[in-house]
Amino acid sequence: MPTRRRAMYFWNGRKVATETDGFLAPRVQRALSMGRFFDFAKRRIAGYIVFWILALLFLGVFYQGNPPAQVGGLFILGLAFIGSLLYTRRMKRRQRARRDAEQHAKQMQQAYQMQQIARMQAPPMGQAQQAQRLQPPPRTGGR
């Protein structure tokens, strides 16, 4: 009777030892929920970085080392916020399009597999039926 190897937590033997990439729980299909969480986190981090890059860039361009007045500082922070918001919205649109394309490809693959199964289960056709199936349908009401 084959036995399963004991769980080891060495980085190189993790998958072999536990068959679960190092976690003792069985694999769970969480790709969609974790993907969306990490997409959200990436957008927030990118927005934060873009915000500060724009804020410092505008400070350097407009004020060249002099401290801005309160209204000027608020204006620059507002511009940086709008720039980071636009960038993260663009990231979200691209991530949504990528997810939709992956889902569409998965559906097409499932439909193709279903067609292949249906073709294999269908009774074999004679030559006359195949020829009739391959002919284009007759045109009606022509010019």
Image: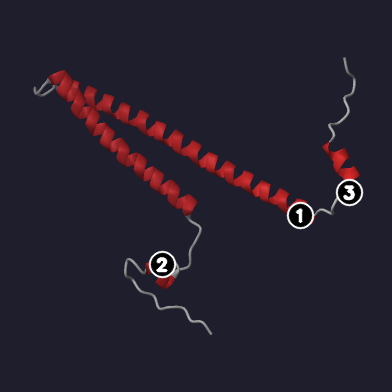
User: 49 or 98: nearer the eye?
Assistant: 98
The 10 Å Cα crowd at callout 2, few under 14, some 14 to 19, many 20 or more, is some
Q: Position of residue 130 (x, y in %)?
A: 85, 43
| Location of residue 39 by image quarter | top left
Q: In the image, which is nearer the foreground, mark 3 or mark 2? A: 3
N-terminal of the two: label 1 or label 3?
1
* Residue 76 in view of the camera: yes
Location of mark 2 (residue): 15
Q: CA distance from mark 3 to mark 2?
A: 51 Å
Location of mark 1 (residue): 120
Q: Position of residue 19 (x, y in %)?
A: 45, 69
Q: Position of residue 26 (x, y in %)?
A: 48, 67
User: 2 or 124: nearer the eye?
Assistant: 124
Q: Determine the residue positioned at 76% across, 54% down.
A: 120
Dot 2 amino acid type = Lys
Dot 1 amino acid type = Met
| Location of residue 89 by image quarter | top left
State the SS at label 2: helix
Q: In the image, which is nearer the foreground, mark 1 or mark 3? A: 3
Q: How is the image coloured?
A: secondary structure
Location of mark 3 (residue): 126
State the SS at label 3: loop
Q: In the image, which is nearer the foreground, mark 2 or mark 1? A: 1
Q: Determine the residue positioned at 48% across, 56% down.
A: 30
